[in-house]
Amino acid sequence: MQIQGWHILVLIALVMIAAVIVAVVLIVKAVSKRSDRPAAAAPRQLAGKEQRLAELDDLRTRGQVSDAEYEAARADILRS
């Protein structure tokens, strides 16, 4: 049994298609691993501080905390 020219082309095409599929699967896995990683703690912590400071400013503006309480709470937030 001899392999004719078009048979070789079909085999090469099938091997190339399989290689492309494997490459796509590997890329998708790499991207999904990267997106599963938690974000850096510092930016999240900074956003938390900003939110807490904004809430504290709001409390001060509405008169629910005194200036001394505001300064103490602000210092605690900035230290954490």
Image (cartoon, grey):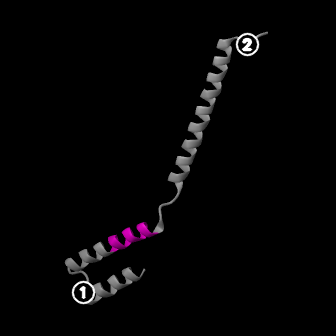
Q: Earlier in the sequence, mark 1 or mark 2?
A: 2
What's the mark number on residue 66?
1
Residue 2 position within the rendered picture, expressed as x and y whole percent measured from the top left: 76, 10
Is 46 colored magenta in this rendering? yes
Residue 19 left/right relative to 59: right
Seen as rendered, the residue at the extreme right is 1
Quadrant showing the N terminus: top right
Q: Residue at x 20, y 81 (%)?
A: 63
Above/below status of 44 relative to 23: below
Where is 68 relative to 8, above or below? below
Q: Residue at x 33, y 87 (%)?
A: 72
Q: Main secondary structure of the magenta part?
A: helix
Q: What amino acid is at disc 2?
A: Ile
- Asked if residue 19 lies left or right of residue 78, the reply is right
Dot 1 falls on a residue whose secondary structure is loop
* Residue 61 within the segment the image draws in magenta: no
Instruction: Name the mark nearer the viewer: 1 or 2.
Output: 2
Q: Position of residue 25 (x, y in %)?
A: 58, 39
Rendering coords of residue 42 (x, y %): 44, 70
Residue for badge 2: 3
Q: Amino acid at mark 1?
A: Ser
Dot 1 crowding, Cα within 10 Å, few <14, some 14–19, many 20+: few
Q: Residue at x 24, y 87 (%)?
A: 67
Report the front residue among 34 and 78: 34
**Image quarter in which the C terminus is found:** bottom left
Tell me which segment is drawn in magenta: 42-52
Whole-number angstrom distance, CA of label 1 to CA of label 2: 91 Å
